[in-house]
């Protein structure tokens, strides 16, 4: 599948299309030469429009001379690879492949292409955005513009004639309603467009008025921003010196060795010298080595995706794919060391993480007694050890600090296509730093730990959803998670649902099941009723993210994945009936002890099938809790949690559950993750003065 995608992408970007009338002459063994319009060119192929291709066939040899008047090359040997019939108004299109072109001819073609590029006569392949969003909400626009100025964001002022000026955001004032930029030259005449390069996307807005003030170019804050993103995975500048090297696939005597500019899980870029490296879009490199000090070279297949102009010269962007599973692990480690230099997901941080939980107040959340957690330490360490190296199942991210751990957040895959973010903790900054310094440090630590936790999960080929069980009234969570989800709830790609987290003690004396209530397993007919009811009463994101759908309800794929790490995962379903009619359904789940210290994966959900205010429905829900306590006790659990989603909670009060407080279930689609991380970076940027 991946190979097919690579082929289609390559055909779309191979070489350069001509933006001007240029000709080439092709001979096919007859006395007459055929002159055609050159429409696409690379160092291995060309495409022509010819008046007629009736006598030609694939595989036929040819001789081609590029350029008329001033020839670029002597005759080059080629062969016909493809012939299209054209249309009523379009001439036939002929594609040819060069056969063993000499190195000198290649250099001449590259030189000619560079001249055409400088003159604006090449149509470079356009990257189609994978995401386009128009932002008009004033609060978001202000937040984004403030972050641009605080981060000294790079941008471009682009005039209507195509000329451009490099700029950097330098000033923001929401009260005066202005944003200011440092410019490397005179600003273009209004109106013009501004492009600002964000975390993983480009922001555009139109400027109708601009003026100079105190050495800055000032303009009114935009009322509308358009965000474009051209790739799913962001690229980040390299933090230590890395280099790449390979032999040219057409001319092995040409050895390319360059320093990298940036990197992502699936790509990289570097500054290229076109006349020396002889690269072009679509070129495939069977074996490329990437080196980083202190690491063995990583061997990968690579494909040139684009060559563009930058302030440093020509920039080459590549898509890469490791050549083996071993190389894939090495590449991931290299990329994460570059993209996340202040955080780790491997190593023995059990003790440091536990001490962080103690010092940060994590063990006091929901009114818990910190001393009760001591008995769970062994289970916690054992579960974390089993996860080590199982990056497709779960991991713990930490931000180390001298003598311990400053922040941590864990990721786990408890459902077939969903990743849970959990166990977030951060140590309070100590020392004489200013209040603003403490806030900036806290935001930086939380941003780092979020990025380290969420970004690697994008590599899971099955990822569909991200979710978290959150305390409802934590300011950071409201600002980062809940605000973002609220913007996209209407699309069905996000949801925020309220619940009350309660805890049951399996040693507690539970109420007897009322005589008129029967508790048992779902019948096939009741199962159909249940899923239909769930689809009508819960958002699609809820059902899909939590595998509350028929095809994944048994958690078979998840249990098999967990078993590879010797971790347990289980789900059961019970129904409470009266007079043969289903009144409520309970979904009971467990996970390996120690994975979550608040037992959020040892939880029961109860879905009323009729009006929950009816006394018999309340009796049925209480009966399900009683039976759930027996189920958890049989599996060695001393406690379990109940996600109370009902409005009428008499049954929970009768069960004497411990109230752990108000919570929110936060869910977003994987397609929104880059936007969420962009929002995270904007919102966690220190505020301007």
Image (tube, helix red, strand yellow):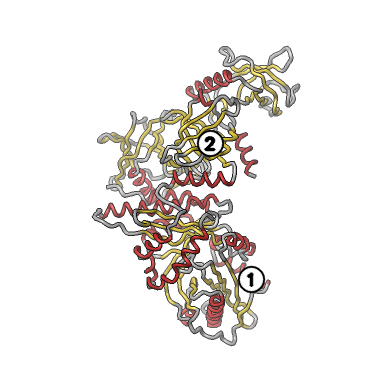
Q: Is residue 389 above or below residue 611?
A: above
Q: Where residue 529 is drawn, which disc sits there?
A: 1
Q: Earlier in the sequence, mark 1 or mark 2?
A: 2
Q: Disc 2 on helix, strand or loop?
A: strand
Question: Crowding at label 2, few (<14), some or many (≥20) Cα neighbours within 10 Å?
Answer: some
Looking at the picture, tell me which residue is in the foreground, 410 or 664.
410
Residue 478 horizontal/vertical position (percent): 39, 60
Residue at the location (34% across, 59% down)? Answer: 427
Residue 387 horizontal/vertical position (percent): 52, 59
Q: Disc 1 on helix, strand or loop?
A: helix
Task: Identify the residue under disc 2.
Answer: 289
Q: Residue furthest bottom?
A: 515
Residue 310 horizontal/vertical position (percent): 43, 31
Q: Is residue 605 above or below residue 552?
A: below
Residue 587 horizontal/vertical position (percent): 57, 71
Q: Is residue 332 above or below residue 520?
A: above
Residue at the location (56% across, 74% down)? Answer: 635
* Quadrant housing residue 543: bottom right
Looking at the picture, tell me which residue is in the foreground, 538 or 623.
623
Q: Is residue 240 above or below residue 465?
A: above
Is residue 15 among the parts visible in the rendering? yes
* Quadrant housing residue 363: bottom left
How many marks the image carries: the answer is 2
Residue at the location (53% across, 71% down)? Answer: 605
- Quarter containing the N terminus: top right
| Mark closer to the observer (1, 2) | 2
Q: Where residue 667 is drawn, which disc sits there?
A: none
Task: Find the distance from the CA under tag 1 to the CA under tag 2.
Answer: 57 Å
Question: Crowding at label 1, few (<14), some or many (≥20) Cα neighbours within 10 Å?
Answer: some
Is residue 232 among the parts visible in the rendering? no
Left or right position of 161 against 247: left
Left or right position of 366 against 599: left
């Amino acid at each position: 599948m991946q190979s097919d995608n690579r082929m289609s992408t390559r055909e779309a970007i191979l070489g350069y299309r001509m933006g001007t009338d240029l000709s080439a002459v092709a001979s096919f063994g007859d006395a007459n030469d055929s002159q055609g319009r050159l429409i696409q060119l690379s160092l291995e192929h060309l495409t022509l429009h010819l008046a007629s291709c009736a006598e030609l066939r694939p595989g036929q040899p040819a001789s081609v001379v590029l350029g008329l008047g001033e020839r670029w090359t002597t005759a080059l040997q080629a062969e016909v690879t493809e012939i299209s019939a054209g249309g009523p108004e379009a001439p036939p299109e002929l594609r040819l492949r060069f056969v063993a072109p000499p190195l000198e001819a290649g250099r001449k073609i590259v030189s000619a292409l560079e001249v055409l590029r400088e003159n604006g006569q090449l149509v470079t392949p356009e990257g189609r955005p994978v995401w386009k969003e128009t932002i008009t909400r004033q609060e978001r626009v202000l937040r984004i513009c403030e972050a641009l100025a605080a981060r000294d964001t790079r941008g471009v002022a682009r005039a209507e004639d195509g000329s451009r000026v490099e700029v950097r955001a330098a000033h923001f004032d929401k009260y005066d309603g202005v944003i200011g930029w440092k410019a490397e030259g005179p600003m273009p005449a209004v109106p013009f467009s501004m492009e600002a390069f964000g975390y993983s996307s480009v922001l555009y807005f139109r400027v109708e008025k601009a003026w100079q003030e105190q050495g800055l170019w000032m303009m009114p804050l935009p009322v509308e921003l358009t965000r474009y993103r051209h790739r799913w995975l962001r690229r980040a500048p390299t933090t230590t010196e890395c280099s790449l090297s390979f032999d040219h696939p057409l001319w092995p005597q040409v050895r390319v060795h360059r320093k990298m500019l940036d990197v992502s899980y699936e790509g990289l870029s570097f500054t290229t010298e076109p006349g020396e490296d002889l690269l072009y879009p679509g070129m495939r490199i069977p074996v490329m080595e990437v080196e980083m000090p202190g690491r063995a070279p990583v061997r990968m297949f690579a494909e040139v995706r684009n060559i563009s102009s930058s302030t440093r010269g020509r920039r080459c962007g590549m898509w890469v794919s490791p050549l083996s599973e071993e190389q894939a692990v090495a590449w991931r480690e290299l990329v994460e060391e570059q993209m996340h230099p202040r955080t780790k997901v491997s190593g023995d941080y059990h003790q440091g993480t536990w001490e962080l939980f103690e010092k940060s107040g994590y063990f006091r959340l929901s009114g818990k007694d910190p001393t009760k957690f001591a008995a769970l330490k062994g289970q916690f360490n054992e579960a974390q050890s089993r996860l080590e190296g199982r990056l497709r199942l779960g991991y713990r991210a930490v931000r180390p600090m001298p003598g311990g751990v400053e922040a941590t957040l864990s990721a786990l895959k408890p459902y077939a296509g969903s990743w849970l973010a959990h166990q977030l903790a951060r140590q309070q900054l100590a020392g004489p730093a200013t209040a603003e310094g403490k806030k900036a440090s806290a935001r930086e630590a939380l941003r780092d730990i979020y990025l380290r936790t969420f970004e690697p999960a994008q590599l899971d080929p099955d990822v569909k959803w991200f979710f978290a069980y959150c305390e409802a009234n934590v300011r950071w969570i409201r600002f980062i998670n809940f605000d973002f989800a609220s913007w996209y709830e209407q699309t069905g790609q996000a949801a925020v649902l309220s619940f009350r987290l309660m805890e049951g003690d399996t040693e507690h004396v539970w109420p007897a099941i009322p005589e008129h209530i029967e508790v048992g397993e779902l019948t096939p007919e009741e199962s159909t009723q249940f899923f239909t009811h769930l689809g009508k009463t819960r958002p699609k994101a809820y059902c899909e993210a939590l595998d509350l759908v028929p095809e994944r309800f048994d958690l078979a794929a998840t249990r098999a994945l967990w078993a590879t790490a010797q971790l347990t995962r289980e789900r059961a379903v019970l129904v409470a009936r009266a007079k043969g009619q289903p009144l409520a359904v309970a979904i009971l789940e467990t996970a390996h002890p120690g994975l979550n210290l608040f037992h959020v994966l040892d939880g029961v959900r109860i879905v009323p099938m009729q009006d929950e205010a009816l006394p018999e429905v309340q009796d049925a829900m209480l009966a399900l809790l009683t039976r759930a306590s027996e189920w958890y006790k049989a599996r060695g659990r001393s406690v379990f949690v109940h996600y109370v989603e009902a409005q009428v909670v008499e049954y929970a009060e009768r069960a004497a559950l411990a109230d752990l407080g108000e919570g929110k279930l936060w869910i977003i689609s994987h397609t929104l993750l880059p936007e969420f991380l962009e929002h995270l970076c904007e919102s966690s940027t220190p505020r301007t003065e």
